[in-house]
Each structure stands twice: as C-alpha cells, then as structure tokens.
Amino acid sequence: QVHLVESGGGSAQSGGSLRLSCAASAGYAISGLCMGWFRQPPGRKREGVASIDTDGSTNYAASVKGRLTISQDKSKNTLSLQMNNLKPEDTAIYYCAADWSNCYYARADFAYWGQGTQVTVSS
C-alpha cells in the first residue's frame, strides 16, 4: 500500500505561484511509480492535471500546459507541482496519485491517492 501525503497548498493572487509536494511512504521509490496530479474545483468533477511516467516523460492538460510543471525529486522521494501564473480557475483541491501501470493523467483510475490540499487563487 503506497501512502501519499500532499503539502504546499494555500492562497495566492492571480499571476502568483505555489509549489505543491507529495511525499510517498518509505519503501516505495517514486521513480518506479507512475504518478499524477489531479484537482477538483468547487462544484465540479475531479480532473487530471499532469502525469509523469517511470521514464520521466510528462503529460499535461491543455488548460495548464506552460504554467504548471510536474517533477520528481528522487533523493527526497517526493513529487512536485510547480504552479506559475496562477488563475482563479486553478482554485481546487489538488490530489497526488500513484499507480504501477497507469501513467496518464487523462485516465483517473490510479490506485493510490493522497488526502488532497486546497489551492485558492484570488483575482
């Protein structure tokens, strides 16, 4: 069982930046896992944001490409999401997820999920 814990959420102004982190439980190297970030805006369904494959290749939703960057820090066994040029529509609960074989954010059937962290962007 992979345990994931997100941190780094908070509030930002439109155009600002935030960085989210996701720590994986000891014994599971994130480099061997497919990982992704998802978000659920208020009153809407959860949607995929970005994913990273075991070879380091990344994929992004069109709405965040060029503004959000997914990355791994293997030394800390953490996944990150650098969020720049934030917009009010980025307001959501952000979830980290992991899977052994699904490496694509557009498919939400990841096996392991964090508890989520709130991001609020004001105009």
Image (cartoon, helix red, strand yellow):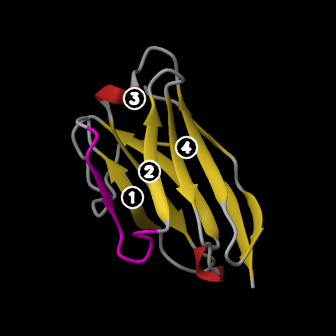
Q: Residue 30's spot in the image, x, y percent?
A: 39, 29
User: Which tag is nearer the camera, tag 4 or tag 1?
Assistant: 1
Query: Marks 4 and 1, how far apart in space?
Result: 15 Å
Quick one: label 3 or label 1, which is nearer the N terminus?
Answer: 3
Q: Which residue is mark 1?
A: 50
Residue picked out by circle 4: 114
Real-space CA distance between mark 2 and mark 3, rounded to the nearest whole angstrom: 13 Å
Q: Are marks 2 and 3 in contact (CB under 8 Å)?
A: no
**Tag 2: amino acid:** Ile
Q: CA distance from mark 2 to mark 4?
A: 16 Å
Question: Of marks 4 and 3, which one's residue comes earlier in the chain?
Answer: 3
Q: Amino acid at mark 1?
A: Ala
* Residue 3 position (above or below residue 115): above
Task: Decide which of tag 2 and tag 4 comes sooner along the chain.
Answer: 2
Q: In the image, residue 68 lies at what x, y percent?
A: 49, 62
Q: Which residue is denoted by mark 3 in the rendering? A: 30
Tag 2 near tag 1, CB within 8 Å: yes
The answer to whether residue 98 shows anywhere in this view is yes
Q: Main secondary structure of the magenta part?
A: loop
Q: Nearer the observer, disc 4 or disc 3?
A: 3
**Quadrant of the rendered image containing residue 21:** top right
- Within 10 Å of the Cα at label 3, are there few (<14), some (14-19), or many (20+) other Cα atoms? many
- Residue 70 tag number: 2
Range of the magenta residues?
56-66
Label 2 with label 4: CB-CB less than 8 Å: no
Give the Cα separation between the discs numbered 3 and 1.
Answer: 15 Å
